Image (spheres, rainbow, N blue to C red):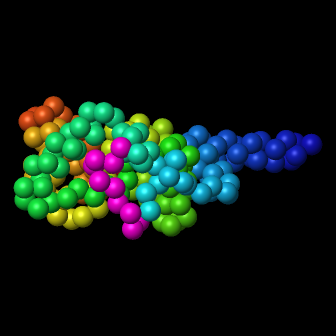
Amino acid sequence: MLAVAAAFALVLTVVAVLLAMNTASSFSAGLSARTPFSPTEADGMIPAESALSVDDDVHPAMTGLDDELREALRSAQAAAAVDGIVFDITSGWRSADYQRWLLGDAIRTYGTEAIARQYVASPEGSSHVTGHAVDIGSLDAQLWIIEHGRMWGLCQTYANERWHFEKATDAGGECPEPMADARG
């Protein structure tokens, strides 16, 4: 009887440790990785070959953006055009389901949640889900925004993602030091 109680206690301890190691978001990411989901335009998905213009007023990836971010992008684009630079939006607003799917995909790609979270935030922590972030595709546009974006409050917010921009300061202000990665 004592051996059975000890074995049961050991099993409960292992289960408690495993549960403590997993966050609610990693649990939901794991579930969604097994749940069929295919992101659509309504979720903010932009096909790789179809980057958007900052002037797009139809696609949910643009219409779901915070108004201040969208206007800052449009004003900055007008200035960048003088230098022959075009902002190609490859990602903007995303639904929580799409973000969860991206995280699950990153976990499968990188093999662990810890590595995946360096590149993909949870739906609860993603600035894309709140409409406060855009990704810019072309290197020329990325470098232009890194150099000039603060004039409109546009800042690179992750050191390992030079394509990811948020309105992180007032126009003309100083951009905060980029966070190391998507983990914050």
Left or right: 60 as drawn, with respect to 173:
right
Please name the residue shown 20% across and 59% down the image: 86
**Viewport quadrant of the C terminus:** top left
Visible residue check, residue 119: yes
User: Is residue 100 shown above or below 138?
Assistant: above
- Toward the viewer: 80 or 55? 55
- Toward the viewer: 20 or 71? 71
Q: Position of residue 110 (x, y in %)?
A: 48, 65
Q: Which secondary structure type mostly characterizes the magenta part of the structure?
A: loop
Q: Position of residue 55 (x, y in %)?
A: 28, 47
Q: Position of residue 159 (x, y in %)?
A: 24, 54
Q: Quadrant of residue 52?
A: bottom left
Please name the residue shown 15% across and 60% down the image: 85
Q: Position of residue 87 (x, y in %)?
A: 23, 56
Q: Which residues are magenta?
A: 48-57
- Toward the viewer: 9 or 42? 42
**Viewport quadrant of the N terminus:** top right
Please name the residue shown 74% across and 42% down the image: 12
User: Is residue 108 shown above or below 149?
Assistant: below
Please name the residue shown 75% across and 46% down the image: 10
